[in-house]
Amino acid sequence: MTYQETLDYLYSQLPMFTRIGAKAYKKDLHNTIALCEAFDNPQKKFKSIHVAGTNGKGSTSHMLAAILQQAGYKTGLYTSPHIKNFGERIRINGQMIDEQFVVDFVDKATNIINEIEPSFFELTVTMAFEYFAEQKVDIAVIETGLGGLLDSTNVITPELSIITNIGFDHTDILGKTLEEIAFQKAGIIKQDTPVIIGEYLPETKPVFENKAMLQNAPIYFAEDMYEVSSIEQKDYLQCNVTDKLNTITEHFVLDLKGSYQIKNLKTVLAAEKILMQLGYPISDKQEKYALSHVKELTGMRGRWDIIQHNPTVIQDVAHNTDGIMQVLQQLKNNYPTARLHFVLGFVKDKDVEHVMELFPKNAHYYFTNAHIPRALPAANLKAIALRKNIKGACFDNVNDAITAAKENAHKDDAVIICGSFFIIAEIND
């Protein structure tokens, strides 16, 4: 098969959570273990960092990978979902996976695919592990797909575990309470392996502490380790960060512009500190350069990306309650007087009823949907919004919705496209 034929096969033949939702989710690790065994357990052949969390795990993974890469380590990065190109999921030093490797891997896996019928995610996780092992990476940053305990990535034994935060998302799978969700995420905490918690709540902190105690895992709380001040948002996000232990304050410049990245920065700095203790030297110069060039180094996109000025047009993959709240707060901070135009599209399994309550009533709305089975039809979204006293027009294509928003916007207005990775993926470059 050609590369495109291989991708078509992966998308069409294997259950894919991003397209169909919970039906593709496997509530155990049997398939992943079987796939890894078929490839001689590649997950045991490289060192790794495991990253979970409701929000921020993608940004945290990219920032860490950028730092390690800039420090001279051959660095693997596994994230999901991709936005435009399948290869975004599996990178080494920012370069997407070799297309011929994808073709050859799927060809080698044909027999076991037919035997166990794995999901798309189970197969691509194994593909990433095999690629990182073959390419002999020094370390790989592995982002969980969903949850932690039963996530397909949870067959690795990492150098360090990271849980960014806990919020309400995928409650149909992970649990209805913050404690239940935290328990699933805490599943990545391993025996004698340090774990960093980015943010915690009164409901979640005891869950993490108990699991860490059971596993004899040193536990660190990033928000208790660092204090941020003097935040400025212009072409770059700038701030001062004080290490509370030694009271040293440093200035940081980030090319990831969303002010919510401040929370992720604390987590990344805590991770960097532990990694250096584990024998991964990183200089101040390497760290600072990496954090101001994450997009260039790792190819990250979709987080507060300003794609046009006059009017300002922003795309962000925020898609759950916590993520949308952060985007709305950023708009309030950065564009307090601008008229707002929201291009929105969600998937069916999100708590859209609750999320729509967060949006301002006096903004302009353009409802759309991605072209995947899991997408919430624009007409359904419009009906939900109407129940919240929010009115807008429907568009079957996100690009038509964006065009309409820009035509209606004045040069000082802001157009925000959010709600799903999948409407961002369908935006024309």
Image (cartoon, rainbow, N blue to C red):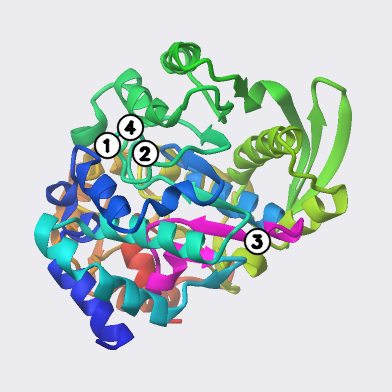
For mark 1, what is the residue?
354
Secondary structure of the residue carrying tag 4 is: loop
Task: State which mark lies toward you, 2 or 4.
Answer: 4
Of 412 and 273, nearer the camera is 273
User: Mark 1, residues whose alpha carbon is within 10 Å: few (<14), some, or many (≥20)?
Assistant: few
What segment is highlighted magenta in the picture? 69-91
- How far is mark 3 from mark 4, CA to CA? 28 Å
- Mark 1 vs 2, N-terminal side: 2
- Mark 4 vs 1, N-terminal side: 4
Query: Can I make out residue 420 in this image?
Result: no
- The kind of residue on which mark 2 rests is Thr
Magenta span contains residue 380: no
x, y percentage for residue 208?
46, 18
- The kind of residue on which mark 4 rests is Leu
- The kind of residue on which mark 3 rests is Lys
For mark 2, what is the residue?
321
- Mark 3 vs 4, N-terminal side: 3
On residue 149, the disc is: 4
- The kind of residue on which mark 1 rests is His
Question: From this viewpoint, which residue is outermost toward the bottom?
Answer: 2
At x 47% / y 27%, what residue is drawn?
Answer: 190
For mark 3, what is the residue?
74
Secondary structure of the residue carrying tag 2 is: helix
Answer yes or no: do the residues labelled 1 and 2 have beta carbons within 8 Å? Answer: yes
x, y percentage for residue 124?
33, 61
x, y percentage for residue 116?
13, 55
Magenta span contains residue 87: yes
